[in-house]
Amino acid sequence: MGLTYQRVLLKLSGEALMGKLSYGIDPAVVQSIAQEIAEIVSQGIEMAIVVGGGNIFRGVKGAAAGMDRATADYIGMIATVMNAMTLQDALEQGGVPTRVLTAIEMQEVAEPYIRRRAIRHLEKGRVVIFGAGSGNPFFTTDTTAALRAAEINAEVVFKATKVDGVYDADPNQNPNARRYKSLTYSHAIAQDLRVMDTTAIALCKDNSIPIIVFDMSVAGNICRAVMGEEIGTIVGESCEIS
């Protein structure tokens, strides 16, 4: 099986780092993710990562509790930096050079996001982790993933989730829900399938970046997805609904 991609972007939710915990970061999960990323990078694939912060703080929930939405979102952005630094530490302990670039400047702990610098790090074989979202409130880390993928000319966005693809209904509530092998951006948006938020899907559509949604809770699935195995659901321009 040959390499399918040269430069990829992996979107990890903050919740993915919790494992079975109800809050925070499970070191064993982070270590497992780092080991898979190390294996991918060892194959010569350039890897960028966008990580969420929902395991620590989610802006939408903060706003629902009465906090100003913009303030809540900024707190959520800071939470993503905590996750990014944690993942960086695990990767570097495994011998993988890693850089955290943040949309909100925190120069004592991370580099500011500069597009050309990010691309240069990737060309040098470093894993680049984007923290602090897009730096703007009201935008999700899904949208950040699509934006950064377009900016660095990534060939694909991998959305690592807790389900094994995109379904036509919630599989936890409907036992007859059907999983798609592939579908178009337009269908995902029209049917509100929640692959990613609408802005993120539209950005990927405009830049012809496919989205692959897969279950990261299965050991080895990140590697399988990036190495081109047919896994999960692919969302693209010319994909037939199947």
Image (cartoon, helix red, strand yellow):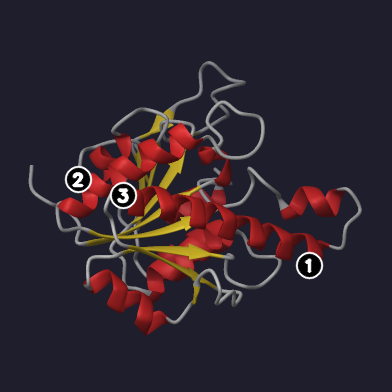
Question: Horizontal and vertical percent for residue 77?
Answer: 64, 62
Q: How busy is the neighbourhood of tag 3: few (under 14 within 10 Å), some, or many (20 plus)?
A: some
Name the image quarter holding residue 24: top right
Q: Label 3 is placed on what type of residue?
A: Cys
Name of the residue lying farthest toward the top: 175
Q: Residues within 10 Å of mark 1 (few under 14, many from 20)?
A: some
* Residue underneath mark 1: 70
194 vs 240, left or right, is right
Which callout, 1 or 2, points at the residue further toward the start of the chain? Answer: 1
Q: Nearer the viewer, mark 3 or mark 2?
A: 2
List x then y, in percent, for residue 12: 47, 48
- 198 to the left or right of 160: right
Q: Quadrant of the C terminus?
A: top left
Instruction: Say the numbered circle drawn on residue 239.
Output: 3
Q: CA distance from mark 1 to mark 2?
A: 39 Å
Q: Give the labeled residue for mark 2.
A: 227
Give the residue type at disc 1.
Answer: Ala
**First-in-chain label (3 vs 2):** 2
Q: Nearer the viewer, residue 146 or 85?
A: 85
Say which element carries label 2: loop
Is the residue 156 above or below the residue 19 in the image? below
Tell me the CA gap for discs 3 and 1: 37 Å
The residue sitting at 29% across, 36% down in the picture is 231
Q: Secondary structure at mark 1?
A: helix
